[in-house]
Image (tube, grey):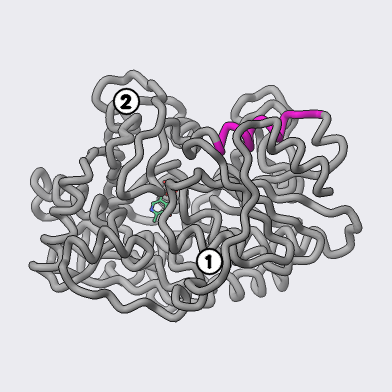
Amino acid sequence: MDYYSLNKKAKSTSFKDAVIRGLAPDKGLYFPKKISPLPKSFFETIESKSNTDIAFEAIRQFVHPEIPDNELKRIVEETLCFDFPVVELNQNISTLELFHGPTMAFKDVGARFMARCLGYFNKDNNKEVTVLVATSGDTGGAVANGFLGVKGVNVVILYPSGKVSDIQEKQLTTLGKNITALEVDGVFDDCQDMVKQAFVDEELTCKMQLTSANSINIARWLPQLFYFMFAYKALKSKYKDIVFSIPSGNFGNICAGMMAQKLGLPIKHFIAANNLNNTVTTYLATKVYEPKPSIQTISNAMDVGNPSNFIRIQEIYKNDFKKLKNNLSSYSYTDYETRQAILEIYEEFDYIADPHGAVGYLGAKAHLEIHPKAHVCFLETAHPTKFLDVVEDVVKTKVELPEQIKAVMDKKKVAAKISDYEGLKQFLLTAN
Ligand SMILES: *Cc1c(COP(=O)(O)O)cnc(C)c1O
């Protein structure tokens, strides 16, 4: 499959090249040249397929022929080494639990897939690739874990100092080996800007092969369409109008859901549930897209003022505002409302949600007020213990730490501090 740059000033390129580059030379995000819907029979018989078969068939056209089928099968199997349960709270609301992977957030899926693609492309290559990634919380841990020990790949993670949870920080600063964490004096958008600047800095790019593992990278972004299909498989026999409510930050997850729909998955509608970082909510209400500095909230993985994947959504709808609005609604919630939602979910359904999932739940409820017959599945994007302080404070009960989390809590944090782009550049030039 060929990919073109959404800035339209760089040449189209192969899947392999797009994965290795991350961002196109004109700073544009890559987008597949063609999206061919899967046959209707694929969805009619989806219950009889395994998750790995679904994923293999769904992603094949996007990586063919650069990854041969037998390798792709292996990559998909290794990526999906955990469960994706759908928990029904009642007739109208369910949640898709995306936190059963090694770092307990949905980003494990994209990170594991991407690491394996890069590992495959790099197997006969002596040149090292440096993966540079900005994280608002969960990306760092998932990428660190997914890439740990992958031959020929060094990972450098930038995270905003004091703005990720303790557990998140441990997950990305304690692995060592080919993983380095840089603690940035700033907010997530500063980290993201620094990463973007590095990609277009010729002094760096002529010395080293840099790539990104944010959802701007197609190999991180596209596999996220898998679990929309898994959720459909679980819900289709019971419910007709299936809507997804997606707690959104950089809008990679929701945009992958829209790709699943493009492939023919019968999804009725999408809800982008936001915290106070509401650039898209405002856009849908006013038609004015105005990026803002990010605001710190308790759902910190969504503290994004200028969501990088929104441009891909615009491409899917060919910039047709009306079409987009027919398929996408967006709501924004305060931290107070989010806490109330965690409490409500706990008291009404005996279920403990994390702050991101709770925002998704609020989006689901808002949709049901207008469409009471719909079935809305909200994505539970991280395990509640990753946000232990908030969750325990609200539900007033102790939450048991899962094994994956216990394992990192006692390890020692190792991170270098930087405060600006020069700091990053010096680090990269001297570390390699
Ligand atoms: C990254 C993340 C999000 C936001 O996902 P996007 O694809 O950036 O919209 C939501 N919840 C959690 C827990 C996350 O880690």
Compared across the picture, whether 3 is left or right of 327 comes to right
Q: Residue 78: x, y in percent?
A: 61, 74
Q: Residue 403: x, y in percent?
A: 44, 81
Q: Residue 185: x, y in percent?
A: 53, 38
Q: Which mark is residue 283?
A: 2
As rendered, which of 36 and 229 lies closer to the eye? 229
Q: Amino acid at mark 2?
A: Tyr
Task: Please say if 347 is above or below 249.
Answer: below
Measure the C-alpha gap from mark 2 to mark 1: 33 Å
Residue at image point 72% right, 34% down? 12
Compared across the picture, whether 301 is left or right of 17 comes to left
Q: Main secondary structure of the magenta part?
A: helix
SS state under label 1: helix
Task: Please say if 159 is above or below 225.
Answer: above
- On whether residue 196 falls in the magenta region, the answer is yes
In the image, the segment drawn in magenta is 191-202
Picture mark count: 2
Compared across the picture, whether 208 is left or right of 259 comes to right
